[in-house]
Protein backbone atom coordinates (compact mmCIF):
# COMPACT_ATOMS: atom_id res chain seq x y z
CA UNK A 1 0.00 0.00 0.00
CA UNK A 2 1.09 3.55 -0.69
CA UNK A 3 0.06 6.49 1.52
CA UNK A 4 0.86 10.03 0.35
CA UNK A 5 0.57 12.96 2.72
CA UNK A 6 0.13 16.50 1.48
CA UNK A 7 1.56 18.63 4.28
CA UNK A 8 3.43 21.84 5.08
CA UNK A 9 5.36 19.79 7.68
CA UNK A 10 6.70 16.70 5.89
CA UNK A 11 9.36 16.15 8.57
CA UNK A 12 6.60 15.52 11.11
CA UNK A 13 5.13 12.70 9.01
CA UNK A 14 8.56 11.30 8.08
CA UNK A 15 9.54 10.98 11.74
CA UNK A 16 6.25 9.33 12.77
CA UNK A 17 6.18 6.92 9.85
CA UNK A 18 9.79 5.84 10.39
CA UNK A 19 9.37 4.23 13.81
CA UNK A 20 7.82 1.13 15.34
CA UNK A 21 5.43 -1.14 13.49
CA UNK A 22 4.88 1.35 10.64
CA UNK A 23 8.63 1.90 10.20
CA UNK A 24 9.12 -1.86 10.04
CA UNK A 25 6.24 -2.23 7.53
CA UNK A 26 8.05 0.29 5.33
CA UNK A 27 11.36 -1.56 5.68
CA UNK A 28 9.59 -4.80 4.76
CA UNK A 29 8.18 -3.16 1.63
CA UNK A 30 4.57 -3.60 2.79
CA UNK A 31 3.86 0.11 2.99
CA UNK A 32 5.26 3.22 1.40
CA UNK A 33 4.65 6.60 3.05
CA UNK A 34 5.57 9.64 0.95
CA UNK A 35 5.06 13.35 1.52
CA UNK A 36 4.46 16.30 -0.75
CA UNK A 37 4.78 19.92 0.41
CA UNK A 38 2.33 22.38 -1.21
CA UNK A 39 4.88 25.12 -0.54
CA UNK A 40 7.03 23.56 -3.28
CA UNK A 41 4.21 24.50 -5.69
CA UNK A 42 3.85 28.14 -4.62
CA UNK A 43 4.80 30.48 -7.45
CA UNK A 44 5.74 33.73 -5.70
CA UNK A 45 9.05 34.68 -4.08
CA UNK A 46 7.66 34.24 -0.58
CA UNK A 47 6.31 30.77 -1.44
CA UNK A 48 2.89 31.84 -0.17
CA UNK A 49 0.33 29.09 0.49
CA UNK A 50 -2.26 31.02 2.52
CA UNK A 51 -4.74 33.86 2.09
CA UNK A 52 -7.16 35.96 4.14
CA UNK A 53 -10.74 34.67 4.35
CA UNK A 54 -13.29 36.64 2.33
CA UNK A 55 -15.91 38.16 4.62
CA UNK A 56 -13.30 38.74 7.33
CA UNK A 57 -12.63 36.77 10.48
CA UNK A 58 -9.54 35.49 12.22
CA UNK A 59 -6.70 33.49 10.72
CA UNK A 60 -5.71 32.47 7.24
CA UNK A 61 -6.81 29.74 4.84
CA UNK A 62 -4.74 27.50 2.57
CA UNK A 63 -5.25 28.65 -1.02
CA UNK A 64 -6.37 26.48 -3.91
CA UNK A 65 -3.46 26.52 -6.37
CA UNK A 66 -0.59 25.01 -4.34
CA UNK A 67 -2.94 22.30 -3.04
CA UNK A 68 -4.31 21.51 -6.50
CA UNK A 69 -0.79 21.25 -7.95
CA UNK A 70 0.52 19.19 -5.02
CA UNK A 71 -2.41 16.79 -5.40
CA UNK A 72 -1.96 16.53 -9.18
CA UNK A 73 1.76 15.84 -8.76
CA UNK A 74 1.02 13.19 -6.12
CA UNK A 75 -1.70 11.51 -8.19
CA UNK A 76 0.69 11.37 -11.18
CA UNK A 77 3.21 9.31 -9.20
CA UNK A 78 1.24 6.07 -9.48
CA UNK A 79 -0.84 4.38 -12.16
CA UNK A 80 -4.16 4.31 -10.36
CA UNK A 81 -5.61 7.37 -8.58
CA UNK A 82 -5.61 7.45 -4.78
CA UNK A 83 -8.58 8.20 -2.52
CA UNK A 84 -8.16 11.76 -1.22
CA UNK A 85 -9.00 12.22 2.46
CA UNK A 86 -8.95 15.61 4.18
CA UNK A 87 -8.14 15.49 7.90
CA UNK A 88 -10.62 17.82 9.62
CA UNK A 89 -12.72 18.15 12.76
CA UNK A 90 -15.69 18.58 10.38
CA UNK A 91 -15.20 15.04 9.05
CA UNK A 92 -16.85 11.73 9.88
CA UNK A 93 -15.37 10.16 13.01
CA UNK A 94 -12.56 7.65 12.36
CA UNK A 95 -13.45 4.11 13.46
CA UNK A 96 -11.73 0.73 13.27
CA UNK A 97 -14.19 -0.12 10.48
CA UNK A 98 -13.04 2.90 8.47
CA UNK A 99 -9.39 2.01 9.19
CA UNK A 100 -10.02 -1.52 7.83
CA UNK A 101 -11.64 -0.01 4.71
CA UNK A 102 -8.61 2.26 4.14
CA UNK A 103 -6.22 -0.66 4.75
CA UNK A 104 -7.78 -2.54 1.81
CA UNK A 105 -6.94 0.29 -0.65
CA UNK A 106 -3.78 0.30 -2.77
CA UNK A 107 -3.41 4.05 -2.40
CA UNK A 108 -4.54 6.70 0.07
CA UNK A 109 -3.79 10.42 -0.06
CA UNK A 110 -4.09 12.35 3.22
CA UNK A 111 -4.45 16.10 2.97
CA UNK A 112 -3.42 18.07 6.07
CA UNK A 113 -4.78 21.54 6.69
CA UNK A 114 -3.02 24.27 8.68
CA UNK A 115 -4.15 27.74 9.72
CA UNK A 116 -7.97 27.90 9.79
CA UNK A 117 -8.30 25.20 7.11
CA UNK A 118 -8.52 25.15 3.31
CA UNK A 119 -10.63 26.99 0.73
CA UNK A 120 -13.99 25.16 0.55
CA UNK A 121 -13.60 24.67 -3.22
CA UNK A 122 -10.68 22.30 -2.59
CA UNK A 123 -13.00 20.13 -0.51
CA UNK A 124 -15.79 20.28 -3.10
CA UNK A 125 -13.60 19.46 -6.10
CA UNK A 126 -10.50 17.57 -5.04
CA UNK A 127 -11.38 15.69 -1.86
CA UNK A 128 -13.30 12.39 -1.67
CA UNK A 129 -14.03 12.43 2.06
CA UNK A 130 -13.29 14.23 5.32
CA UNK A 131 -12.18 12.36 8.43
CA UNK A 132 -11.93 13.55 12.04
CA UNK A 133 -10.04 11.68 14.76
CA UNK A 134 -12.23 13.11 17.54
CA UNK A 135 -14.29 16.02 18.79
CA UNK A 136 -11.44 18.40 19.55
CA UNK A 137 -9.47 20.83 17.42
CA UNK A 138 -5.81 20.26 16.56
CA UNK A 139 -3.59 22.98 15.12
CA UNK A 140 -3.20 20.98 11.92
CA UNK A 141 -4.06 17.70 10.24
CA UNK A 142 -0.61 16.11 10.64
CA UNK A 143 -1.26 14.42 14.00
CA UNK A 144 -4.54 13.07 12.63
CA UNK A 145 -2.79 11.80 9.47
CA UNK A 146 -0.18 10.10 11.66
CA UNK A 147 -3.01 8.36 13.52
CA UNK A 148 -4.46 7.08 10.22
CA UNK A 149 -1.03 5.95 8.97
CA UNK A 150 -0.36 4.03 12.18
CA UNK A 151 -3.78 2.37 12.36
CA UNK A 152 -3.77 1.48 8.64
CA UNK A 153 -0.07 0.54 8.48
CA UNK A 154 -0.25 -2.04 11.28
CA UNK A 155 -3.05 -3.84 9.40
CA UNK A 156 -0.93 -4.45 6.30
CA UNK A 157 -0.36 -8.18 5.99
CA UNK A 158 2.98 -9.06 7.57
CA UNK A 159 3.34 -5.78 9.51
CA UNK A 160 2.58 -7.32 12.88
CA UNK A 161 4.83 -10.18 13.94
CA UNK A 162 1.84 -12.14 15.19
CA UNK A 163 -1.14 -11.89 12.81
CA UNK A 164 -3.45 -12.91 15.64
CA UNK A 165 -2.72 -9.71 17.51
CA UNK A 166 -4.74 -7.69 14.96
CA UNK A 167 -7.61 -10.17 15.17
CA UNK A 168 -7.63 -9.79 18.95
CA UNK A 169 -7.48 -5.99 18.93
CA UNK A 170 -9.97 -3.85 20.74
CA UNK A 171 -12.88 -2.97 18.40
CA UNK A 172 -12.23 -5.91 16.09
CA UNK A 173 -15.57 -7.63 16.57
CA UNK A 174 -16.99 -4.43 18.05
CA UNK A 175 -15.83 -5.04 21.64
CA UNK A 176 -13.08 -3.68 23.87
CA UNK A 177 -10.09 -5.91 24.56
CA UNK A 178 -9.87 -8.13 27.66
CA UNK A 179 -7.19 -7.52 30.36
CA UNK A 180 -3.71 -8.99 29.84
CA UNK A 181 -1.06 -10.07 32.35
CA UNK A 182 2.61 -11.05 32.29
CA UNK A 183 5.24 -11.98 34.89
CA UNK A 184 5.40 -11.98 37.87
CA UNK A 185 2.48 -14.22 38.86
CA UNK A 186 2.12 -12.34 42.14
CA UNK A 187 3.38 -9.09 43.58
CA UNK A 188 2.25 -6.19 45.79
CA UNK A 189 -0.36 -5.20 43.14
CA UNK A 190 -2.05 -8.58 43.20
CA UNK A 191 -2.18 -11.96 41.46
CA UNK A 192 -2.71 -13.03 37.86
CA UNK A 193 -6.17 -14.64 37.43
CA UNK A 194 -5.81 -18.39 38.03
CA UNK A 195 -7.54 -19.43 34.80
CA UNK A 196 -4.80 -17.83 32.64
CA UNK A 197 -2.24 -20.21 34.13
CA UNK A 198 -4.45 -23.31 33.93
CA UNK A 199 -3.38 -24.32 30.43
CA UNK A 200 -7.06 -24.98 29.65
CA UNK A 201 -7.42 -23.12 26.36
CA UNK A 202 -11.20 -23.43 26.16
CA UNK A 203 -11.55 -21.93 29.64
CA UNK A 204 -9.06 -19.17 28.82
CA UNK A 205 -10.94 -18.24 25.64
CA UNK A 206 -14.21 -18.17 27.56
CA UNK A 207 -12.71 -16.02 30.35
CA UNK A 208 -11.27 -13.55 27.83
CA UNK A 209 -14.52 -13.26 25.94
CA UNK A 210 -16.40 -12.69 29.20
CA UNK A 211 -13.97 -9.95 30.27
CA UNK A 212 -14.19 -8.26 26.86
CA UNK A 213 -17.99 -8.28 27.03
CA UNK A 214 -18.01 -7.11 30.64
CA UNK A 215 -15.59 -4.25 30.03
CA UNK A 216 -17.51 -3.10 27.01
CA UNK A 217 -20.72 -3.18 29.07
CA UNK A 218 -19.08 -1.13 31.85
CA UNK A 219 -17.09 1.34 29.78
CA UNK A 220 -18.70 1.56 26.35
CA UNK A 221 -22.37 0.51 26.47
CA UNK A 222 -22.78 2.40 23.16
CA UNK A 223 -20.51 -0.19 21.46
CA UNK A 224 -22.25 -3.11 23.11
CA UNK A 225 -25.62 -1.91 21.84
CA UNK A 226 -24.33 -2.24 18.28
CA UNK A 227 -22.99 -5.82 18.38
CA UNK A 228 -25.10 -8.90 17.92
CA UNK A 229 -24.59 -11.28 20.84
CA UNK A 230 -24.78 -15.04 20.32
CA UNK A 231 -26.06 -17.39 23.06
CA UNK A 232 -22.63 -17.83 24.64
CA UNK A 233 -22.02 -14.07 24.71
CA UNK A 234 -25.36 -13.44 26.42
CA UNK A 235 -24.59 -16.10 29.04
CA UNK A 236 -21.07 -14.74 29.64
CA UNK A 237 -22.31 -11.18 29.98
CA UNK A 238 -25.01 -12.27 32.43
CA UNK A 239 -22.35 -14.09 34.48
CA UNK A 240 -20.12 -11.02 34.43
CA UNK A 241 -22.96 -8.73 35.54
CA UNK A 242 -23.93 -11.07 38.38
CA UNK A 243 -20.33 -11.28 39.63
CA UNK A 244 -19.86 -7.54 39.25
CA UNK A 245 -22.98 -6.75 41.27
CA UNK A 246 -21.98 -9.24 43.96
CA UNK A 247 -18.70 -7.39 44.66
CA UNK A 248 -20.11 -3.85 44.19
N1 LIG B 1 -7.46 18.79 12.13
C1 LIG B 1 -7.70 19.59 13.19
N2 LIG B 1 -8.42 18.95 14.11
C2 LIG B 1 -8.64 17.69 13.63
C3 LIG B 1 -9.33 16.56 14.12
N3 LIG B 1 -9.96 16.56 15.30
N4 LIG B 1 -9.36 15.44 13.35
C4 LIG B 1 -8.75 15.44 12.16
N5 LIG B 1 -8.09 16.47 11.64
C5 LIG B 1 -8.02 17.60 12.38
Image (cartoon, helix red, strand yellow):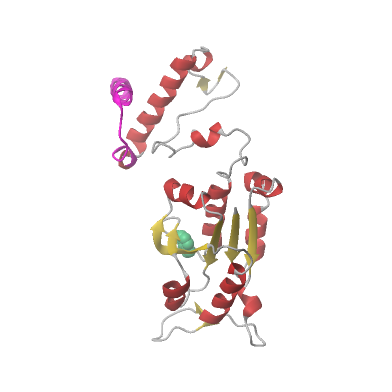
Residue farthest to the right? 27
Q: Is residue 144 above or below residue 25?
A: below
154 within the magenta span: no
214 vs 182, left or right, is: left
Residue shown at the point (58%, 48%) measured from the top left: 153
Q: Position of residue 140 (x, y in %)?
A: 52, 66
Of residue 107 and residue 225, the one placed in the foreground of this image is 107
Q: Position of residue 138 (x, y in %)?
A: 49, 62
Residue interval drawn in magenta: 223-248
Q: Position of residue 166 (x, y in %)?
A: 53, 37
Q: Position of residue 15 (x, y in %)?
A: 67, 56
Of residue 158 and residue 141, the one placed in the foreground of this image is 158
Q: Is residue 40 above or below residue 191?
A: below
Residue shown at the point (68%, 48%) measured from the top left: 29
Q: Main secondary structure of the magenta part?
A: helix
44 vs 90, left or right, is: right
Residue 4 sits in quarter? bottom right
In the rendered image, is residue 63 in sight?
no
Quadrant housing the C terminus: top left
227 within the magenta span: yes
Amino acid sequence: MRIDVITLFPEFIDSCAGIGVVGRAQERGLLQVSTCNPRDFATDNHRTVDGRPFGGGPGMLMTIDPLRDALASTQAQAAQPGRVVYMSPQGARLSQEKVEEFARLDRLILLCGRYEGVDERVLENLVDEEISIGDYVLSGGELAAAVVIDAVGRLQEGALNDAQSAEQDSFTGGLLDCPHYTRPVEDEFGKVPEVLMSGDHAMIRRWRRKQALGRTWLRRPDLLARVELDDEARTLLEEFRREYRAVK
